[in-house]
Amino acid sequence: MSNRITRGAWSVAVAAGLLLWGAAGLRAAMPATSLSTAPSLTANILPGLDRLAPLGLASPLTEMRVGIGLAPTDPAGELALFDALYDPASPLYHRFLTPAEVADRFGVPASRYRAVESWLRRGGLTVTHVDSARTYVQASGSAAQLDRLFATTLRTYRSKGVDFVANDRRPAVPPGLGIVSVIGLNTLQRFSVPERPRPAPGIGGLYTDSYTPQALWSLYDQPADNLGQGQTMAVIGAGSTDSVVGDLRRFEDLNHLPHVPVTVRHAGGGAFKDNAGAVEWDLDTQSSTGMAPLVRREDLYFGSTLADADIVAAFSRWAGDADAPAQADASFGECETNPTNPVSGNPALNPPGNVGQGLGNNLQPVADQTLLQG
């Protein structure tokens, strides 16, 4: 079942149950980074990695994408405004900001962003995505370039039959840039979609446990004037969308539904050819438009893969789009939905207090932005 998220209230469950939500999440995730000193990015290395013997060095030509989280300008002011926006007694109640206003008031100053961009480019990296508030930057480069830039070494490891690349020490970043997190320096941690066994067809090849959209409208007593009229929707996912849109059209034709306009909005770098989540994206698009076939459009905000740095880029593009739908589906999770993960699923290798790998520091500004925008 997909998770319905809205700009007014959304959550991100990170690794061992870290839930960033509302004011409590804002207070808990308030970065304590001083711009004058280099931060200690202790969360940006796989915990327990020192218990695995490296197999060797990563190929220096291996291309990887990393996500850089930057501290916002005025976190205390952001928290105060958030409280006012959601306090019915406040004159600012529900007077939400636009993405541009969030960027102007709380985003990273252009001068600091340019310094970060210059540092990345000097290291040979290519900037592939910047969110509207400049609190999240995605960049791509080779393993050799990442080693030099972050003063770490990318090595290959194997655990429970899974081979992966990971940095062997926490990344080093310059002081003064306000960098709070670096994700993407390992190939193990990524989001995953739920396993969905295909039902066995019944007599005549029909799936007897399936319902048509019309049957569901009747089952839920859905009013005829509540089929999505005037609304827009979004799906946040990753990889290729060609088969997803094609499958949606066949679903609509089979069920005598109108063709909902679909816009694909790619975020970040990559080839966008990954089909690992195609079944899940089919479910998201068809279930949403099946129940609301009269929506004005459905937007697909897709990263290249389910890797952390790509998914954060997809979320940040949705949050920064002034015309983005107010509701979206995101049918994937990390760690808690994949207990067989060879490192993060092993309590001995992954103490609960250390999981997440800094993902919350990258996703929290995106969550904050959606809350400020209503």
Image (cartoon, rainbow, N blue to C red):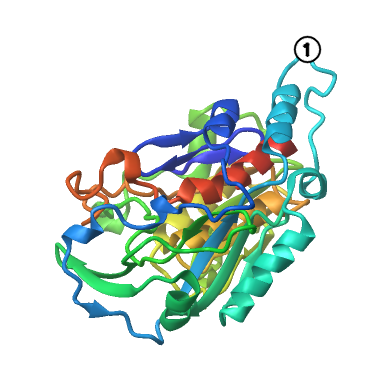
Nearer to us in this view, 364 or 149: 149
Number of marks in picture: 1
Report the residue at 54% width, 32% height from top. 25
x and y percentages locating residue 313 in the rendered image: 58, 60
Secondary structure type for disc 1: loop
Report the residue at 55% width, 26% height from top. 24
Q: Residue furthest right?
A: 91
Nearer to us in this view, 307 or 147: 147
Nearer to us in this view, 333 or 202: 333
116 lies above or below 321: below
Is 313 on the left or on the right of 225, as rendered?
Answer: left
Quadrant in which the N terminus is drawn: top left
Quadrant in which the C terminus is drawn: top right
Report the residue at 41% width, 43% height from top. 14
Is 188 on the left or on the right of 38, as rendered?
Answer: left
- Residue receiving disc 1: 89
Residue 37 appears in the rendering: yes
Is 110 on the left or on the right of 281, as rendered?
Answer: right
**Which amino acid, by three-letter code, is at mark 1?**
Ala
Report the residue at 60% width, 59% height from top. 301
Q: Residue furthest front?
A: 36
